[in-house]
Amino acid sequence: MPKFHTLDKVDRKLLNMLQKDNQTPTRVLAEKLHISQPTCLRRIKTLRDAGVISADVAMVDPFSLGFGMLAFLEISLQNQSDEHMRDFEACMNHEPEVMQCYFVSGEIDYFLVIHVVDMEAYYQFVRRAISGSGNVRHFHSRFPMKRAKFSTRIAFDEKAPELNVRVGR
């Protein structure tokens, strides 16, 4: 049975602020939220413990590091048994080029987001991880020409009295 955690207005405002800059000192966060610094720290810890905050990470721009090619792969598996799908997912979890992997509905089985240096690196990835997997029936690549929007932020409504969110898995 899923567990739920109630986010009040302060929690949602705090989450919106942390998603913009999680390096903001708790003193500043507390001032903006009109709460004490210990209360702010306690709320952040509670949100982490509940799994609402899943990680504190630095967002690195892959393009500035020379990873100039993004690819979207649509994958159809030959065998879609639970065991084969788990094997495919485990393989994709070990591939550093795979930024995201989704099991999807429809005509394809998986949608992947791949980031590599260039076309040669993409070719090597496909040969090794996709064609070499032994269970890929078909794959289709798409290459974005421009990134019009990218965000990892979840926008929380700060005006609603409270919001119940499912936590844990």
Image (tube, rainbow, N blue to C red):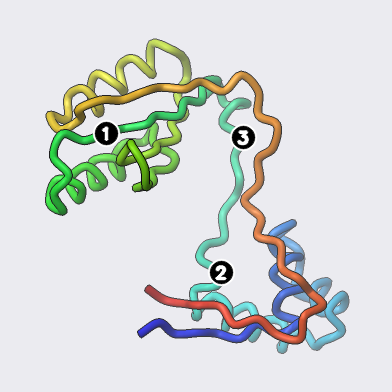
Between disc 1 and disc 2, the foreground one is 1
Q: Quadrant of the C terminus?
A: bottom left
9 to 131, vertically: above or below: below
Q: CA distance from mark 1 to mark 2?
A: 33 Å
Circle 3 Cα neighbour tier, 10 Å, few/some/many (<14 / 14–19 / ≥20): few
User: Does residue 64 appear to the left or right of 9 in the view shown?
Assistant: left
54 to 37, vertically: above or below: above
Q: Are marks 1 and 3 in contact (CB under 8 Å)?
A: no
Q: Which residue is located at x 56 percent, y 69 percent?
A: 53
Query: Residue 41 lies in what quarter of the image?
Result: bottom right
Q: CA distance from mark 1 to mark 3?
A: 30 Å
* x and y, in percent, of residue 43 in the image: 65, 83
- Mark 1 — residue? 76
* x and y, in percent, of residue 85 in the image: 20, 47
What's the residue type where badge 1 is placed? Ser
Q: Which residue is located at x 47 percent, y 22 percent?
A: 142
Disc nearer the start of the sequence (3/2): 2
Q: Of helix, strand and loop, which one carries label 2? A: loop
